[in-house]
Image (cartoon, grey):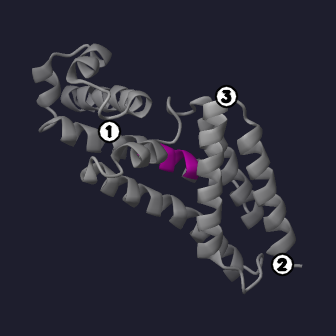
Amino acid sequence: MRKGELTKRMILDRSSALFNVKGYSGSSISDIMRETGLEKGGIYRHFKNKDDLAVQAFQHATSQMGVRYAEEIKKESNTLDKLKTFISVFTSLVHNDPLPGGCPIMNVTLEADDSHPLMAEQAQIAMNQLLGMIEKIITNGIEQGELRSDTQAKQIAIIWISSLEGALALSRLYQDTVYIDTISSRLLDELEKQITAK
């Protein structure tokens, strides 16, 4: 990697963590300069403006999460273990792992709802990828005969993400993993009881 690419990567690493903790609106260019140790010109050499940096930092954060999911899930051979692994990676967000501030998709969704349509659009794209990941695991499980043929992959993906995101928010709010642990356990119990092929 060339020096310019390394610098851009460093800016993305540090600003994605900053935005995820303080929010887009709550992070000033001065904050970004402090985090990166660069002057304003050194930052804007790589990005058109703060919006461009915010979009690329968000894409960087969600890409890191996507890689983490993919690496862990591919270690598993059956559908149930893949879904357990998905939950395990998701619940690691409670502990700021791998990114401080929790789930970047939910954080941007809450902040950018009406105030920043560009970031809201990015959050939708990332959320669609997350939903699609679960849906694909379930669809593959149906095709391989591990899950019942009448299993509703899309509905399950929606229920899982809605439940997990809500539980993550409560666990972070109360600094107590009981919320994410309870939902994770319940989702897996329901999966095992209702859709695992006998």
Earlier sequence position, callout 3 versus callout 1? 1
- What x and y, as percent, mark residue 125? 38, 60
**Which residue is denoted by mark 1 in the rendering?**
57
Left or right for 81, reference 140:
right
Q: CA distance from mark 3 to mark 2?
A: 37 Å
Q: Is residue 9 magenta-colored?
A: no
Q: Quadrant of the N terminus?
A: top left
The range drawn in magenta is 63-69
**Distance between mark 2 and mark 1 Cα atoms:** 42 Å
Q: Position of residue 27 (x, y in %)?
A: 30, 26
Q: Which mark is residue 151?
A: none
In this orientation, which residue lies closer to the viewer: 68 or 185?
A: 185
Residue at image mark 2: 197
Residue visible at 76% across and 81% down? 145
Of labels 3 and 1, the one closer to you = 3
Marks 3, 2: nearer the viewer: 3
**Considering the image in quadrants, where does the C terminus appear?**
bottom right
Say what amino acid the circle numbered 2 marks: Ala
Q: Earlier in the sequence, mark 2 or mark 1?
A: 1
Secondary structure of the residue carrying tag 2 is: loop
Residue at screen point 33% across, 53% down: 120
> Circle 3 sits on which residue?
175
Residue type for callout 1: Ala
Name the one closer to the observer, 47 or 104: 104
Left/right placement of residue 13 relative to residue 46 reads right
